[in-house]
Image (tube, coloured by chain):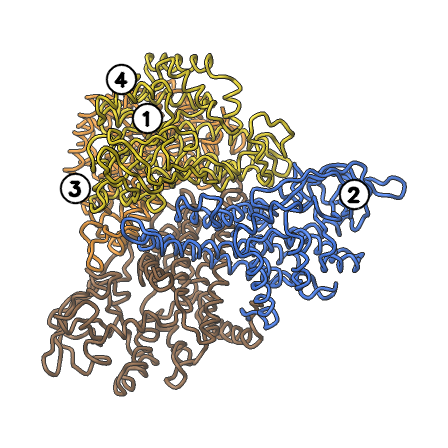
Chain colours: A yellow, B brown, C blue, D orange
Amino acid sequence: MNFEYSEKEENFRLEVKEWLSKTLPKSLSEKVKKYQRLTKEDYEIFMKNLSAKGWLAWHWPKEYGGTGWNAIEKHIFEEEIIKASAPRIIPFGVNMLGPVLIEFGSEEQKNYYLPRILNNEDWWAQGYSEPGAGSDLASLKTTAIDKGDHYIVNGQKTWTTLGHHADKIFCLVKTDLNAKPQLGISFLLIDMDSPGIKVKPIVTLDGEHEVNEVWFTDVKVPKKNIVGKENEGWTYAKYLLTFERTGIAGVPYSKSALNHLKIVSKKSLKNGKPLIDDPVFSSEIAELEIDLLAMEIFNLRTVNAAAEGKAPGMESSLLKIKGTLVRQKTTELLRKALGPQALPYLPEQFDEGWNEMPIGPDYAGPIAKQYFNMRKISIYGGSNEIQKNIVAKASFGL
Amino acid sequence: MNFEYSEKEENFRLEVKEWLSKTLPKSLSEKVKKYQRLTKEDYEIFMKNLSAKGWLAWHWPKEYGGTGWNAIEKHIFEEEIIKASAPRIIPFGVNMLGPVLIEFGSEEQKNYYLPRILNNEDWWAQGYSEPGAGSDLASLKTTAIDKGDHYIVNGQKTWTTLGHHADKIFCLVKTDLNAKPQLGISFLLIDMDSPGIKVKPIVTLDGEHEVNEVWFTDVKVPKKNIVGKENEGWTYAKYLLTFERTGIAGVPYSKSALNHLKIVSKKSLKNGKPLIDDPVFSSEIAELEIDLLAMEIFNLRTVNAAAEGKAPGMESSLLKIKGTLVRQKTTELLRKALGPQALPYLPEQFDEGWNEMPIGPDYAGPIAKQYFNMRKISIYGGSNEIQKNIVAKASFGL
Amino acid sequence: MDFSLSEERKMLKETVARFFESNYKNINKRSENVYLPEGFCKTFWKDSAELGIISALVSPEFGGLGGDGDDISIIFELIGKSLCVEPFLASGVLSSTVLSSVSKINIDLINEVVEGNLLIAFAHTEMNNRYEDSFIETNASLRGRKWCLNGTKSFVINGDTANKVIVSARIDGNVNDKAGIGLFLVDNNQITNRSYNTIDGYRAAELIFDNSNAELIAKDNEALSCIIKANSAGALALSSEALGIMETCFNLTLDYLKTRNQFGKTIGSFQSIQHRMVDMMLEIEQVKSAVMLASSTYQSDAKTRDKNISAAKNLVGRVGKLVAEETIQLHGGIAMTWEYSASHYAKRLIMIDHLMGDSDYHRDRFKLLSVS
Amino acid sequence: MDFSLSEERKMLKETVARFFESNYKNINKRSENVYLPEGFCKTFWKDSAELGIISALVSPEFGGLGGDGDDISIIFELIGKSLCVEPFLASGVLSSTVLSSVSKINIDLINEVVEGNLLIAFAHTEMNNRYEDSFIETNASLRGRKWCLNGTKSFVINGDTANKVIVSARIDGNVNDKAGIGLFLVDNNQITNRSYNTIDGYRAAELIFDNSNAELIAKDNEALSCIIKANSAGALALSSEALGIMETCFNLTLDYLKTRNQFGKTIGSFQSIQHRMVDMMLEIEQVKSAVMLASSTYQSDAKTRDKNISAAKNLVGRVGKLVAEETIQLHGGIAMTWEYSASHYAKRLIMIDHLMGDSDYHRDRFKLLSVS
């Protein structure tokens, strides 16, 4: 066995790295490093550069304008953009809707939407979750009533990430009201400027606005906006959920956070000495580093299997669980490392251009906020509890 | 609030302590301290002394020859006998069958059995568990078929502690074969020398023989040996399970084990220095000590409530869970403290009179063995999982 | 043994509970108070004083009506339940503990505090002082016959609106020496401050001393033992507050589990969730027990007091993390929102571990004190 | 990247698996072997040698057919699954690693080991040496031109039946000095031993050296780096063995959960049990990953080798405890019995943490090595 990358793969990594160093504005990566709020434009700059390079659709086959990369290349690409502190690629259009349209969309839909995604003409949002249906998507209540050539949509979606920037939203809606849960659901594309749509911000516990509620009141949606067949939306939604996710463990995020943790622990003092010299605290870091090291190999094993065409089974679920635990633990130790320096909360500090003196060291500001924010990762995208149910059912026959 | 004992209680403690120092043979407490195997006589010596003092039936009301102690006195008594390294009081007759007979037995049964228990004339065993029914007592399969003036008993009991010493056994048996689980069960007293009874030792993972299988083949049991009414044995069994158990958390055991842990950690060397000076290891000890300190107060709160006549509810279950975890953690740290010294296994070392040189320090021998043995405490007496089910059902309404 | 509260304390508990309930009913009220100019509600504070809540934190010897460990713990458990941000900790516990522990007692000053007329903050923490008692860089020197302070104190809770501040400063010796420490009383007009909210809703400030005039109230051993006592009193108060928060978190979660449906059943009917609730309940009972022990021995010798308080605060740190994280996880998304109270309880619970010594600090202190 | 085994190794794995399976089928067979005079089965050992299993642990350079990290890890994972007690660790890994790492290679000796004719034990641990590489009290001195040893070595696995023993001893310097260490080869007729079984079924011995004649095979830096390499090789072997045990424990538990009924349902149908099984499975995958990393970098520079092996052994210690305890707890009483195999797997798994460095030791070593 040998876990080193091939020369070809190393060259590819170098190409990504060099491209990023040339095209990613320093001011932008600085904002990301400082956890400052990103504007719509900040995301778009990076995504437009990716478009120009032909790398935006990194999960698509070549024939549709994608990269055609295998799982290892995707993994390298993702590692490098995270290491470079680039903004994240907003996944809703390019990584989520795109693959669904490629697999299930009509020719007309493909011809219209895919180029627009490739050129960043539409900002897509995802309309899955509802107030009464978190991890249990099958019990959703938003309805789309057939009115001949259009549907009338009523209901409410929630946790819509960056929905306030969106031009369009893909939604799961109930088209057959009498069907059982999971049945009678359709996959619908909706313009956000349709009359009757209202976006309300949700402020999260860290005081930030990233997610939204989206309310639909008698929203008219043309019938051609349905993807695939009526009442079969659940199949398409599931396709997305099982879609190969090489990055699910968030290894590069945890690696960079662990690195940060070591730096902070060197600077934080306990009894006048660097905290990292405290045997108990450094032991916690060491065991976390070991967990992460093992998880990186576990992740690579899965990436490699995917590159060889094997479908990821319970590995995705296990990596999701461990990935979130490791990442949360890193933010916890960062918070603990600060001691009382974790207390101050200056929301204005995360605005672009803020250049007052921080309270305490410059790295302290975002840390407690990040700790609380990161509680979400074990909840969304199928909570860790749901992942455990999936594994138990699929792998144990229990 | 004030957690100090009253003068009366302190005097009582002194009385117990002094009595123990006078009557408990030094050779016996040494055997207990060294975890040596106790003979039937070892147990009986101590219990006979208790009888003579009138303290054997420490859970019984005065009118039946018991002590009539309240929960705090019982708690003090139990603490002191453990501190003195006395053998444990075999509970099956005096603490288990006794209270059941007092509550549900016929006058004839009370007159016959209770004095015999008080005078240690019978060694009782408990016949509840069966191979197919561990925590799930209701599904037991041992049958007692009505034959007019007697029953014919067939079946198998298991985990019968010290059953190889027993003269008599109280059993739960199925008397109505058509009844649903929990119904049709009777509480039967059986002579161990009845024809058709066979006791087979179970050797546990630590190589010791304490528990047994008891096989019944066409065993004839007189009808007068049934306690209470036929088919209502489940009620009496439950009475025992809910019977006030002030010692369920095992606080005095854990306190003495923690003390031992500190001594061992002072003697064990790491890089030539006492292990207790290792910051990580001593931190584990400190947090365990804190857990135990809190549990001791939690236990006292419950003892106190019991002394005031309040029935213990979910507290018993919570204390059982935490008590086993703390005690198991203590044995784990003891094992870890030894390092490679935990490896040797000399079963003969636990025989009375063994006086060869031990391998390594004299305290090392029993430690790993004890660690493995203590895995049982979270399984028996209603596993920790069962305790959690009970709490969830009773306290949450979930 | 006596596990019950005296009749007087039961009444106190009921009165204060009712008062908090009617004034701090929902989380929006609290959020409003957080953004008032003072970072808390002056009227509420004044009303609390009139009701005798501050008085209950001070011993009769100094004009109060309580001041025992049990009093602190009763009141702060209720503070935890209502999540109130009034300066009970700064003025009611930390400063009044110092003022009533020095040898030169200023009874008038304590009276003013008890009546809520005067707000006094306790400024000991510095940027490089994690939680240590004697690690002090702020400098005190004599100019003629007047003391004058130079340096910066950090994370001073309610340090911006306090009328006066009790400040620890180094008169002599090296930064971590146990000797050479002084405690000073400083008027707020002698201090420049930069104030901000903390992530858990309190108001704190950096206090800058630039040749600030100061009155010496204790020095050397006396000063250090006052600092230690104040920090222990604060840790006891915060442990009790944390207990109140944990109980609330548990109840909020239980209610949610009973009503929220997923896959056609209440979430609470899932066994894995039930077992986690039992784990939480058990640990909260442990915390309750540790807090009871700490509060009942608060009046003992310093070693017993500090050992039991460290045991409680360490356990609070560990269990607090469990309860805060489980409360959010078992709720799911809703507990991630600002709108829902659980998120604020969780934040305060976590941040209590960053005040008056975290679980690591108190574990180490317990270790030292438990060696007999 | 290459996560798969070569065709040769796949064949090796299959052959060895089949061999273990047919010779070590049930736990009673193992218990019999444990109580044989040697503490293992000589016939089985000889057969293993003929099949090439010892050879697979030694590099072709020294007459073996393997010797890479992957070879060690394949064979010891299978040893874990069959729980066999033959002296693969002592003679196959520890001693042959030393013999093939010193500068004065004695190829004939290695051949004898590979062929199973000669059993060599590695005696480094002492009563006061926890897991340290250089903490050595046993003394070596020159009498004329002959080396002679005095002292006691403890917990020497298979030290009683070994024909020869490799012994670390101090030639010079203080007890924990890195310099002044020698490695010696000693005939068993020079040694008094006291032998006993370990709680996990192995045979070990105390070896007493009383002016024992010894042959020096390495000293100073060379000796120390051989000791470190042998200990790392042993830790890799034990980590792989632990992985095999964990996989077996998991499968035994899963089978039991599927068949055992309680309250009218299989235990496995309870959600809280299912979630704990997922936790176990996840951690076993982590261990598998860490062992893969460690074995694939075994031939790298010493620092990389030792760092990754320490990572694996630390994780094995932590996860081993989880798996052993959960295996017993989820089974219930049956796993407390000597008769049922799970108890023996659990015991070996736990005791592996007491060999070649426990989880604390390897965490500390990882800490030192991960500072770049």
The verdict on a common chain for dots 4 and 1 is yes
Estimate the spatial distance between the alpha carbons at disc 3 and disc 1, rounded to whole Å: 51 Å
Q: What chain does mark 3 sit on?
A: D
Residue B266: give x, y in percent of width and height.
52, 48
- Above-or-below relation of B379 to D343: below
**Amino acid, disc 3:** Lys
Disc 2 and disc 1: Cα gap in Å?
59 Å
Q: Name the residue under label 1.
A: A95
Cα–Cα span, label 2 and label 4: 70 Å
Residue behind mark 2: C189
Instruction: Point out which mark residue A371 bears.
Output: none
User: Residue D213: in sight, yes or no?
Assistant: no
| Both labels 4 and 3 in a single chain | no
Q: Do the residues labelled 4 and 3 touch (CB within 8 Å)?
A: no
Q: Mark 4 points at which residue?
A: A64
Up-down: is C219 above or below C141? below
Residue at 19%, 49% (x, y): give it.
D258
As helix, strand or loop, the secondary structure at mark 4 comes to helix
Q: In this view, does B64 lie to the left or right of C21?
A: left
Q: Residue A190: x and y, percent?
A: 32, 32
Please, which chain is the residue tagged with disc 4 on?
Answer: A
- Density class for disc 3 (Cα within 10 Å; few <14, some 14-19, many ≥20) is some
Q: Mark 3 points at which residue?
A: D25
